Image: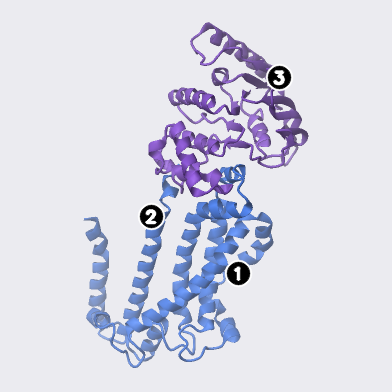
Chain colours: A purple, B blue
Amino acid sequence: MTAFDKIWVTVKNVARQFSTRKEMVTALENVSFEVHDGQFVSLLGPSGCGKTTLLRMIGGLDVPTSGTITIDGKVVNGPSPKMTMVFQEYSLYPWRTVAQNVGFGLEMIGTPPDQRKAEVEKQLKLVGLENFSDSYPYELSGGMRQRAAVARALATDPAVMLMDEPFGALDAQTRNKMQHELLHIRQETKKTILFVTHSVDEAVYLSDKIVILTPRPGSVHEIYDVPLPFPRDRTSMEFAQIRKNILQVIEELETDCQNI
Amino acid sequence: MKGYFKLIFPALFIAGWEIAAILVNNPFVLPMVWDTLVVFTTPFTDLFGNGSLMENALVSIYRVSLGFIIACIIAVPLGVLLGRYQVLEEFSDGLIQIFRPIPPIAWVPLSLAWFGLGEPGNPAPASIEYIIVIGCLFPILVNTIDGVKRIKKSWVETARIYQANELQCLTKVIVPAAGPGIWNGLRIGFGIAWMSVVAAEMLPGTTTGLGYLILFAYNWNQEQIVIAGMIAIGLIGIVMDQFFQYVQRSKFRWEALDK
């Protein structure tokens, strides 16, 4: 990392509280980290630690109770065109074909149809769905649907791609394949990616940097730089060691939490 | 085999009707099956100076279509707005809930007071159209509101992520996503509109339509025309409902398949 690195996302002292009928629940507190240009950063933590809430706030779909989030130096107040988001449940529109789904973002910003078509074709090719442009989402497998969602996210050429447990609903084999393909896509497009997961293995396989969150209320426990070069070998000693270290950290966090 | 099976009960019913008619032996109470069918075999024959069965059916269809379209133009956009903006829905919900259970027939006196009997020769007097509109407005409205409210939250959020403005959100996501619910409302609404038109045609001053025809035929003791008119009402209702179901299956296939 050099001093000239562009910082895309800055999260500073962010807290988020929700009011339930009886009380105020603190989902997140004192969260700070940065995402630099071209980095792959994972938010890792147990279920219910507020990592999805955090991602939604960065995406402009939710508002922090306190603290600030900036994208490219500007405070987030609603979804930014510099950013896009891939949801766990794909969120494709079932009344639109794959090509129409991938072109959705371009349609919204008024890209002319022929330009849109070319861009959609390019993205479908990148994710390997060029033969499915006229299919409907319900005709595709889970892995293919998520590829279509990724193509849609890439089509508007955002600087940062937010991914909320995008492979969480997939079976283990498809999941591994999708992880591999995501790294390929990242290499091709040089996108900055902020990725939410609760899988240590997934985080270590994909990330330059892992933000480890504590259980509720979520806060940053540790920011871990993964020193391995890409592509990574899951069966290597180094990989296993890093995974073990992080698993230990998380286990300790959960035990502490139960002791309270 | 399944097709035949469906026909067994109607066939038994018709046989029972014929037997009953023979036993009753009074065409002013229950006409013979054949006498009733004759009305259908000669649909263009004038019936006692009141026009043919076909003419009257077409007048009723014209009336119901007009009222139904007016109701759609009001209820669908209104329902989309009320479903989208919770404040508006809460604001109007009380009024809607009070008006909704009032049957269309209960509007007859007010409709006559406000719009009068209608001039002779006007096929669609305001008094009749009002009853049709008020009858199908609420099912369409309530189903549209419900359809819009049940849209997956992530669909709307996705649109926002992709910089959709509010108008794009409504036209490109909310309306297509609520399409199946809205269409279901139209189907229910049309069924009620069709019932309403027959009832409205029994209003004083009306001289055309299937509702008028069966009431007039009763006054002239022509029960075979009464029953033929009722069957025509039923058949037209089935055909329209099948049309709505067909569109539901073909156009909104994704709703059942998207899991």
Q: Between disc 1 and disc 2, whose residue precedes?
A: 1
Residue picked out by circle 3: A221
Q: Amino acid at mark 2?
A: Ser
Q: Chain of mark 1?
A: B
The amino acid beneath tag 3 is His
- Find residue A10 and report its image quarter: top right
What residue did someone put label 1 on? B99
x, y percentage for residue A149? 51, 37
Q: Residues within 10 Å of mark 2 (few under 14, many from 20)?
A: few
Q: Quadrant of the N terminus of chain A?
A: top right
> Taking A249 as reference, is B206 above or below it?
below
Q: Is residue B29 visible?
A: no
Residue at point 41%, 83% (across, down): B209
Residue at (60% x, 86% y) in the render: B113
Query: Given the image, on which type of amino acid does mark 1 rest?
Result: Phe
Q: Quadrant of the C terminus of chain A?
A: top right
Residue drawn 51% across the image and 69% down it: B136
Dot 2: element: helix
Residue A141 in the figure: left or right of residue B83: left
